Amino acid sequence: MNGAQALIESLKREQVEQIFGYAGATICPAADALKDTPEIAYTLVRTEQNAGHMASGYARVSGKVGVCMVTSGPGATNLITGIATAYMDSIPIVAITGQVPSHLLGRDIFQEVDITGAVAPFSKHSYLVKHVNDIPRIVREAFHIASTGRPGPVLIDIPIDIQQAQLKKFEWPETVNIRGYKPSVKGNDLQIKRVAATIAKAKQPLICAGGGVWLADAREELLELAERAHIPVVKTMMGISLMPTDHPLNMGMIGAHGNHCANQALAKSDLLIMVGTRAADRAITSPDEIQRRMATIHIDVDPAEIGKNMQAAVPLVGNVKVILRQLLDLDIPVSDSADWLAKLRDYRKAELGRVFPQRPGSVFPGTAVRRLGAKLDDDAVVCVDVGQNQIFTCKYLPQKHGRLLTSGGLGTMGYALPAAIGAKTALPDRQTIVVCGDGSFQMSMNELAAIKAGNLDIKILLFRNHTLGLVHQIQQTPPYHGPFGVDLDGSPDFETIASAYGIPTITVTEEDQLDESIDHFLAHKGCCLMICQVHPSVSTTD
Amino acid sequence: MKQTISVLVENQAGVLNRITGLFSRRAFNIESLAVGVTDDPTVSRITIIVDSGNNMVEQVEKQLNKLIEVIKVRTLEETNLIGRELMILKVNANNKTRQDIMTICEIMGAKVDDISPTSMTLELSAEPDRLDTFQAMMRPFSILEVARTGVIAVQKGGGKI
Ligand SMILES: Cc1ncc(C[n+]2csc(CCOP(=O)(O)OP(=O)(O)O)c2C)c(N)n1
Ligand SMILES: [Mg+2]
């Protein structure tokens, strides 16, 4: 058995069923071993960044570790944005890169880059494999590190000579023991009691839930806590789909681009319970203000997040699911929040019933996502890109019991399409939708090839406003003096592009065509593109 | 405020890189850093001096703890630590000045490592403040070279980290 075979055998031991990758000389031995492994499916991407995004989409809906594999040098550097995007959203992926022969490392030979060095600031960990016999242990550790504690991307860089070297014996370690890595799981009992007591005293408590709830698979526990204690819930962008829109305790998304109701709730609450969120700048724009005005409880698996952006009155470190369960096992008191809830529900109703502006010859994105959401399957997976399209979707797409995936931390344009491919590959039976802008679509439309090759039924809703809308919007407000470098001149006819891949297109220019068009769009068997014509001067504050 | 952080790490290639990378990325300033292997050859101890507020040091500790190869991190209490730094200092010296230099060395407890007709090379291990004083006393004689190791430190008493 050689190193490459040991690598693939190790992936099998980790129950890997899918790799997203791109070929190249230094990863050929691994490709050769994969060729004889029908248990692991392989998707060829069209640029390596998207292998990272696909692994991310795959991981987020399956709860497993996503795996991508690329060659050294340019393959590895192309993957960097995928790794950084996963890191910022704490998504568990393992990235495998080929590397030049060990004895030539450091000589700047053809296609050599120091990829472990390059990704150090935005990966959870990385390995440069030095001995072929280490491969099983390193793979085992990489999967353990990627998926436990606060999840994140781990990179394994394997020189080609090590892939080709013979192993003495394949030994799969039964357990992982890394002395410097012992993430806490259970919350401190005393702190848990303090939390319960603090909740009991609050009149206007509020839960703020983030992506950490998904990562810990703690959605049920979160809902149980909110419902039993009568606490309204706001979410960050990473936590949006944790609760259906029509849930009486759901107050929407907070943040600079969030729902008015959610931000009101945040401003007026007397106890903020943050669950699986890092209180980042986009979500909580004035942490000092909040700290001064209300008590805070912070539940997170990463101790470094507690006190980084905001000091919490009661910190609780551990697995979010375990901690919420501990809390639920104590008879948590029902808080006396009836007045508070009534007030918030008025805000919420006003916002949900909000009338959007109309312009003949175009579709308002808020209107389109409202109509789309109403017709989606109960458990649909919606992947949304970055820009105005993202803000409208996050604010107004009705949520049911599915998922909304977006690049929250890094805001990487081009994320949605490959993430949807990853998600659809993991869960082929789930309705899968991409929402994107005409700028972001052009960053990853080459992956229509992966959709075609995989015969994937993915629906793509594209908002065409001929501009990099969100930046256009920023440039129209002081201190700037008007749009520059945002017109998408030279964009192709997307219908022609789609048809080149055998994908049909539906174009909508009037809102009264929306319902019928969405019905056709969703009923089509196979991938379909729906283009909504959007006026370039639409703003997310309209 | 200066604080001394003691970090036990896996004795492996690339670890120091990760640690210094973390400091620059998070805009934490390192005042000095010293590394050496411990009694266990698989473990190195890094002593880092930072000059910053308490909040910052808490973040530094937490971020260091997140590195997989970091085994233990502890901020040592300033009043309860033994901290030493080694300095080697080369100074101009001739028949007129040599005796004065010797006197200062005796007072400060420095050792003469090397001597030449025009220079002396001196060695002093002490707390950093004392090294500063010594260096200041040597300056009038015209210092040729200074090399300092950065502080290494352990907690007083029987405990260990
Ligand atoms: C890779 C990348 N480059 C640049 C940006 C900055 N950026 C944020 S939103 C945006 C415009 C997105 O345009 P489009 O996809 O057309 O969406 P719209 O805002 O028009 O809905 C840009 C350029 C980014 N987030 N990601
Ligand atoms: Mg656009």
Image (cartoon, coloured by chain):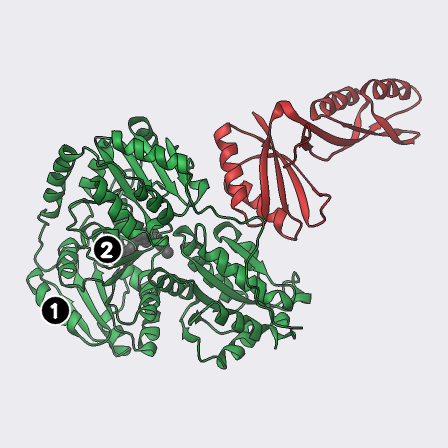
Residue A389: mark in rendering: 2
Q: Residue A59 appears at what percent x and percent y? A: 38, 62
Place residue A344 in its image quadrant. top left
Q: Residue A228 appears at what percent x and percent y? A: 22, 43
Q: Residues within 10 Å of mark 2 (few under 14, many from 20)?
A: many
Q: Amino acid at mark 1?
A: Asp
Label 2 CB-ligand 1 distance < 8 A: yes
Residue B116: mark in rendering: none
Measured in 3D between alpha carbons, the distance from the residue under mark 2 to the one under mark 1, in whole angstroms, is 20 Å
Residue A495 shows in this picture: yes
| Residue annotated with mark 1 | A519
Instruction: Give the quarter the ligand 2 occupies.
Output: bottom left
Q: Which residue lies most toward the left here?
A: A512
Q: Residue A79 appears at what percent x and percent y? A: 46, 62
Q: Which residue lies most toward the bottom here?
A: A36
| Residue nearest the observer in this picture, A75 or A89 | A89
Q: Which chain is green?
A: A
Q: Colour of chain B?
A: red
- Could you tell which of marks 2 and 1 lies nearer the N-terminus? 2
Judged by depth in the image, the label closer to the viewer, 2 or 1, is 1
